[in-house]
Image: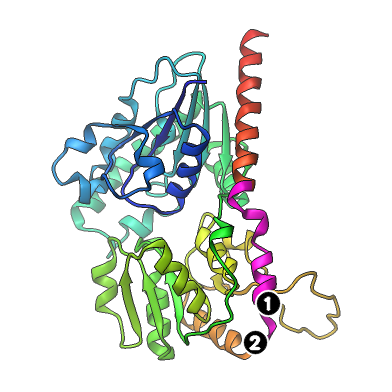
Amino acid sequence: MKVALVHDWLTGMRGGERCLEVFCELFPEADLFTLLHRPGTVSSTIEKHSIRTSFIQRLPFSHKAYRYYLPLFPRAIESFDLSGYDLILSSSHCVAKGVRVPRGVCHIAYIYTPMRYVWDQYDAYFGAGRSGWTARTGMRFLRPRLQRWDVGSNRDIYTFVAISGHVAERIQQTYGRTAEVIYPPVDFQAFSPSIRDGGFYLMVTAFAPYKRVDLAVEAFNRLKLPLKIVGAGQDEKRLRSITGPTVEFLGWRSDAEIRELYASCSALIFPGEEDFGIVPLEAMACGKPVIAYGKGGALETVVPLRTSRPGDTTPEESGPTGLFFYEQTPEALIEAVYLFEASRDRFDPVRIREHVKPFDRSNFKDKFYRYVRMKHQEFSGSRHA
């Protein structure tokens, strides 16, 4: 097959790029289309592909302020000519799935979320205090148009694949389409179980509004416990302004440094409502518990600590790998940390690590390849029926 890979943008190695990296391994001869590319920010596996960028690449300040060009993204993604390809595989959380599909070409869309900027996370990005007056005013007019485009661009997608059941439900609600669920990969073999405890809690995250780094900062300011935060992003200046002496920002770190931080922390803090969340699985692959907001993708990856209830004699089927808090407030997170501190002996690093095995990269690679081949054959058969 002649394959075209389509990804929103290439500016760093986060969860979506980890998936894209596997797609590049599965289809090493594929061409890669993206809105913009900052060379050197993604892995060599991705960089060695033929990368085609849109006109967004040439706009002023696009390498740092590309999100300001959001109204132009639909036009940019539609500008790619994908004639001559047998298969289009889009990797999308924004507009990548909206490429124009030539007649007779199978398009499979791997969806991290429907475009969060105009759907479920609109207020987090454009609510009062989150963006300037000009951006808020402009988006009030542009949002309906972007929503119509987002829904209409699905007409030539043959099949949707979602990264979690949570996202599959959102695809159904937003687009009225069903989606197969194939969980993203974790490089299980790259991590080792650790019983070390350096006495600090850890976050590894982009500083996007929905990640709720502010909630963790406020909670640990009050707890006066050490919290190390790996990451960067648009909210960094605001977050640093509210940070107390026990919270430390480390910036982005290498994979090896992050593995060392996982191995040394007491537990991972995960306060946002995530579409899936590879970071908790990476921490658990090191045998570390996760304290997570009990909504979204975390419900599909974390086995929560069961607190005793009167008359409850049901045994746990497997050891807990973390615990949940159910309100996105500093008070709820503080209470969860106290519960964790009182329950440390309930968490077994070896059992926590074993829980991650089914999410291993090799399993994802095999399952996804078989699914793509099956759907491409099905599409080809329907054309000739």
Crowd band around label 1 with a 10 angstrom C-alpha radius: few (<14), some (14–19), many (20+): many
The residues bearing labels 2 and 1 have C-alpha atoms spaced at a distance of: 9 Å
Pointers 2 and 1 in contact (C-beta within 8 Å): yes
Q: Residue at x 71, y 82 (%)?
A: 307
Q: Is residue 353 found inside the magenta-colored segment of the image?
A: yes
Q: Position of residue 277 (x, y in %)?
A: 52, 59
Q: Which residues are magenta?
A: 344-362
Q: Amino acid at mark 2?
A: Ser
Q: Any mark on residue 161, and which?
A: none
Q: At 34% across and 64% down in the image, what residue appears?
A: 207
Residue 343's tag is 2
Q: Amino acid at mark 1?
A: Leu
Position of the C terminus by quadrant: top right
Looking at the image, which is closer to me, 231 or 309?
231
| Residue beneath the point at 40% across and 23% down | 100
Q: Say left or right for 331 vs 95.
A: right
Residue lying at 86% horizontally and 80% vertically, measured from the top left: 313
- Give SS at disc 2: loop
Residue 39 vs residue 304, the one in the foreground:
39
**Number of other residues with Cα within 10 Å of mark 2, as a class: few under 14, some 14 to 19, many 20 or more:** few
Q: Which residue is mark 1?
A: 305
Label 1 secondary element: loop
